[in-house]
Amino acid sequence: MGTLDWIILSGTLLFIVGYGVWKTRGSQNVEDYVGGGKDAKWWTIGLSVMATQASAITFLSTPGQAFHDGMGFVQFYFGLPLAMIIICMVFVPIYHRLKVYTAYEFLEDRFDLKTRSLAAVLFLIQRGLAAGITIYAPSIILSAVLGWDLRTLNIIIGILVIIYTVSGGTKAVSVTQKQQMFIIMTGMFITFFYILGYLPADISFGKALKIAGASDKLNILDFSVDPKSRYTFWSGITGGLFLALAYFGTDQSQVQRYLTGKSLRESQLGLVFNGIFKIPMQFFILLVGVMVFVFYQYNESPLNFNPSATKAVMQSQYASDYQLLEKGHRELEIDKKMAQNEFSAALELKEYTAVEEAKLHIMEINKKDSANRAAARTLIKQANDDAETNDKDYVFIHFILNNLPRGLIGLLLAVILSAAMSSTASELNALGTITALDLYKRNRKGTFGEKHYVYASKAFTLLWGGIAILIACVANLFDNLIQLVNIIGSIFYGNVLGIFLLAFFFKFIKGNAVFFAAILTQVIVIIIYYYLIHIYPSGQEKLGYLWLNSIGSFLVIALAIAFEGFDRLLKNPPIKA
């Protein structure tokens, strides 16, 4: 990184923090601090909702996901537009009519205090873990690639977010997210066009897509009904639908974004905006990853994109074996480039047979390349069992640092850190709000003024910021960071969504039945996750994790109905003849 990169990076981050503090100074009551003044326009809500979901993990992991596995991950979002319609029709009108600050206030009104508290605690557990990961994600990768100290990075990112989130509350999060989304999308578009410019002169965008397609990177739709497949059309519109319903309808980090709306209509329009543009945004980010793949068909790439993993094996007794694999990798890269040229020439001639033969040749080389990379991962693991062998999260940052011009590197790093700050701010804001209003205020005896609860919200936000930094400092990198966040969410979201569905549509169900059904459901879902997903290597799971969302929802509903029926039977036993 050059001086220009440092100026752009530090200037961007300091501007976001300063702008957030300045724009939201003077929040003196709960309405302003937690509710954001209830004056947000629909475009602010829409961008804030998108920015909350689009963490640094999105911009680090998603291109790497596409590089290795293609565009199929976009199916994960197929249930989102339908979820937005349902939330706009059911959830948002109820929240606005009741004038709640948190989603869980509604649960006490419908059931009882213990059910509200249970849902709040489930949220705090999963979102507290996720907050740590959203800090840890960019830190671990920037640390490995740039050589920066990991814990120092965790602390710096955490403190920057805490400053403006504690200072300005919900409005600070919303107003800064508009700037962050502008920076993020500007950086991604510039990168996309730079990648196209780096391709050989005879490779147009259309031909680049055909090259990617020859390696099965453009297989968007998978209609397989195999429950073990992680991303299919069916898991997207079922498991993805339930995950989106739970995330946008019951997760306070999102609910708090649209509860700031000036009116019901503004909140609904903001969610519709997200429903329309979220899939295209994710599609574009995946497409950037696919273009990075095409770029590396013509340019040198490392055998493993994680520099710390490569360093670990090169300092071990397996160094000579790894060097042999690297030699084979370089030879494959030459073969790969020649095969791509053959394919490109066949496309120009429009000879179907030649195109198909060239495509088969590419597939053979890809199989050899995959086997070579798998052997490298095995050696890395043998050299250091703690080393992270999965390099999906390092692909995009490697491309940025090694191929983009000075200045743009600083902008892209600002994109990654802005995204981390954006989603972390939303999470800390929601964690502090839930702790202050759903647990502290509701269970504390005595009457206190507005300022007391504003200070309590600030204190709890600060506390959760410290907890998130601690989690980030002790976290371990998982298979793929974007999947880790979604797995954590899937374990808890289905259960919480089921509680809300019971509240909305099953009027005969009482609080006790829901409370005990939710506890039992959470235990069962964790057991299912452990025995059908966790204990198996990546790609060999017995169940795709997205299905946990629908399982949790249906299970808590079924158990609550059963418990309610059993309770009524005990209270009103049938009269014997």
Image: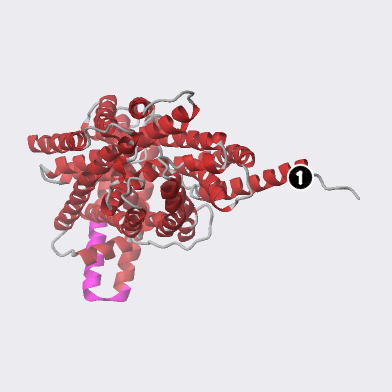
Residue 574 vs 1, above or below: the answer is below
Residue at (51%, 38%) from the top-left corner? 119
Q: Main secondary structure of the magenta part?
A: helix
Q: Is 65 in front, or is 487?
A: 487
Quadrant of the rendered structure where residue 488 is?
top left
The segment highlighted magenta reads: 336-353
Most extreme residue toward the right, as rendered? 577
Quadrant of the rendered structure where residue 391 is?
top left
Q: Is 144 in front, or is 444?
A: 444
Q: Position of residue 265 (x, y in %)?
A: 34, 56
Q: Is 510 in front, or is 118?
A: 510
Which residue bears the numbered disc 1? 569
Quadrant of the rendered structure where residue 84 is?
bottom left
Residue 86 vs 48, above or below: the answer is below
Q: Is 171 in front, or is 239?
A: 171
Whether residue 480 is visible here, answered yes or no, is yes
Whether residue 477 is visible here, answered yes or no, is no
Residue at (50%, 56%) from the top-left corner? 238
- Secondary structure beneath label 1: helix
Horizontal relation, residue 7 to residue 66: left or right: left
Q: Position of residue 268 (x, y in %)?
A: 36, 55
Question: Label 1 is placed on what type of residue?
Answer: Leu
Residue 225 vs 15, above or below: the answer is below
- 524 magenta-colored: no
Quadrant showing the N terminus = top left
Q: Position of residue 472 (x, y in %)?
A: 35, 29
Horizontal relation, residue 110 to residue 59: left or right: right
